Amino acid sequence: MNHHSTETLSQCRVWARELGFSQIGVSGIDLSAAEPGLMAWLAAGFHGGMNYMSAHGLKRARPADLVPGTVSVLTARMDYLPRLPPLPHLSASAANDWRAAEWAGLHAPAQGTVSLYARGRDYHKVLRARLQTLALRLAERVGPLGHRVFADSAPVLEAELATRSGQGWRGKHTLVLNREGGSFFFLGEIYLDMALAPTEPVTGHCGTCEACVQVCPTQAILAPYRLDARRCISYLTIEHDGPIPLELRPPMGNRIYGCDDCQLVCPWNKFAQRSPLPDFDERAGLNAQPLAALLGWSEADFLRRTEGSPLRRIGHIRWLRNVAVAAGNALAAPGVADTEGQALRLALQPLLQHESETVREHAAWAMAQQASAIPPAVHQAMASGRSGGVS
């Protein structure tokens, strides 16, 4: 790496820290080695209804095709675990045992669980604005600079660029893992027409562990490094339009937006870092709320409560669909109080007349559930009872 490039990258690291990023790196643009795997994944149909993935084809693996003139890519990662509110009655160790708290939430069937990344402000907006600031500071230093920033917003092979630039290695769940930060972070990129020497990749450290493969409630991780998105709860609750396949509803448990199981069970997430930014603080009224109350949200309620949140992107229909599935699973779960069951049935009743066929069908399915209808083994999967196996 030449002296000019080293100094520039060092200064970028200082700016990145000031902007809330955990790490930056540099990748080259020759991603041809990733093309066969991408095409095989698409050919298998594992992307499901995410048609934009197949529409862009190999452009994802060819940065200079996406942004002509690109010669290097600056990659960035940003931790997103919400900051802890002050809890003076808890010891430091108890207050920091956030993974145990998350598993406990999955064992509260009458409450909805929202993925950790979605409990605060929409990360697309946070990352894009801060990446743009970083790019402008770089341009002020080096002179005229062609650039374009991405935050999960275009056909970009984010994980490939991240691993090539040393942000971490690809875990068996296909997410990027970092020794100092686990996997609870967002990735972003700045495509540059300026040549920067690539940073060194790191070796993988999953070893023989397959906890993420084993814990997946819907067995979406078919084998290490092989994910069928069509079975993934994150895909089903966020990307998928229309009815959720019947056989995948019970394992969804009370997960109403996204799923963190494969990350929660990963030993490397002992080292996941809290975000320094208030943007990702947990917004009141979204996570761990009674499903009966969530079923009662009108579209106006939904839009008001999810303003500036990533939850808004799924719209009110998918929201009611997801919550209805969780309500059905709660009605089928042993140990749910009679009062909770009654509240759920009362909340579901009006949805049987909803204008959306999808909502009506999922509400009817939920009403038909009862504790005796689902085998105990499925209840265990619904609550991710296997979580105790990895500390």
Image (tube, rainbow, N blue to C red):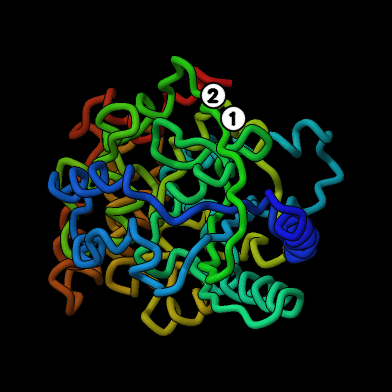
The crowd level at tag 1 (other Cα within 10 Å; few <14, some 14-19, many 20+) is some
Q: Position of residue 124 (x, y in %)?
A: 52, 69
Residue 308 visible to the viewer: yes
The secondary structure type at the circle numbered 1 is: helix
Q: Between residues 356 and 115, which one lies in front from this camera angle?
A: 115
* Picture layout, residue 196 above or below residue 92: below
Left or right placement of residue 78 versus residue 215 in this view? right
Q: Give the residue displayed 13% in from the left and 44% down from the top.
A: 44
Q: Position of residue 106 (x, y in %)?
A: 46, 40
Check the image and name the residue furthest to the right: 88
Amino acid bearing label 1: Trp
Q: Quadrant of residue 117?
A: bottom right
Residue 240 visible to the viewer: no
Residue holding disc 2: 205
Residue holding disc 1: 268
Amino acid bearing label 2: His
Q: Give the residue displayed 29% in from the left and 61% down from the top.
A: 239
CB under 8 Å between callouts 1 and 2?
Answer: yes
Left or right placement of residue 168 versus residue 159 in this view? right
The secondary structure type at the circle numbered 2 is: loop
Using the numbered discs, state the Cα–Cα distance from disc 1 to disc 2 in whole angstroms. 9 Å
Left or right placement of residue 307 versus residue 48 in this view? right
